[in-house]
Image (cartoon, coloured by chain):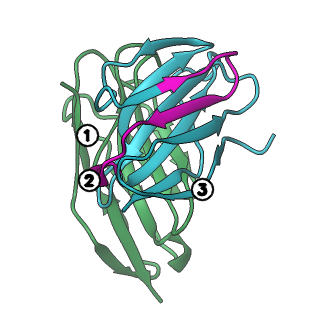
Amino acid sequence: DTGVSQNPRHKITKRGQNVTFRCDPISEHNRLYWYRQTLGQGPEFLTYFQNEAQLEKSRLLSDRFSAERPKGSFSTLEIQRTEQGDSAMYLCASSSRVEGETQYFGPGTRLLVL
Amino acid sequence: GDSVTQMEGPVTLSEEAFLTINCTYTATGYPSLFWYVQYPGEGLQLLLKATKADDKGSNKGFEATYRKETTSFHLEKGSVQVSDSAVYFCALSGSGGGADGLTFGKGTHLIIQP
């Protein structure tokens, strides 16, 4: 297993467009998290899945942000009607019940909104 | 809410110097504490962790002790190398047993000069 993977690694879009990012967690990890990281800041928690259930979504930044994990494996994060302020690194992490709170991060998707 | 405060960088040291990066936290309950490292162009990597008071996490010559009485988790290394140059993040998990996201500090940029 090669760890958490994210695609694409980089995305440039124009303001008002929709974008979707994909995260593939470590196999057999039932927990999946999304974070946003802006320049000079630590990651900011957005949402959490346990298997296919989204158990925490109140921290999503606005109703333009949504996430899914339809079969409890990979997840997608969608941003609708992007704004320049959405430019950031979007990180995905996964963890297992056995390891509890220890989260393993992917390389991130860097979004630039023009 | 939960918060993490780290010393601001950049921190610049000479090779073989002693390193301390301060981290203090505010949290309800009994969080687990983590240090993550982000090397240039790479994703976040778990460096070490501690899950209860007085636990010491260690890895690659780095150590940190969970001090409940001072709500601190300072990162130390006896002799740093140029390859340790990176951004270091202190983080805590909430009391949700892994069901909530990590709360990160802003990160400390460490620069080691030969």
At 36% from the left edge and 41% from the top edge, which residue is drawn? Answer: A81
Q: Does the image show residue B102?
A: no
What kind of element bears circle 2? loop
Question: Which chain did the image draw in green?
Answer: B
Q: Does the image show residue B52?
A: yes
Judged left or right of residue A26, residue A69 is left
At 34% from the left edge and 21% from the top edge, which residue is drawn? Answer: B94
Tell me where residue A67 appears, x and y as whole percent: 49, 26
Question: Which chain did the image draw in cyan?
Answer: A
> In what quadrant of the picture does the C terminus of chain A appear?
bottom left
Earlier-in-chain disc, 2 versus 1:
2
Query: What residue sits right under mark 2 in the picture?
Result: B22
The three-letter code of the residue at mark 3 reads Arg
Q: Quadrant of residue A57?
A: top left
Task: Work out whether A65 lies above or below A28.
Answer: below
Q: Nearer the viewer, residue A7 or B99?
A: A7
Tell me where residue A113 appears, x and y as whole percent: 38, 57
CB under 8 Å between discs 2 and 1: yes
Asked if labels 3 and 1 share a chain, the reply is no
Query: What residue sits right under mark 1 in the picture?
Result: B72
Region in magenta? A67-86
Q: Which disc is residue A9 wearing?
A: 3
Tell me where residue B37 appears, x and y as whole percent: 48, 55
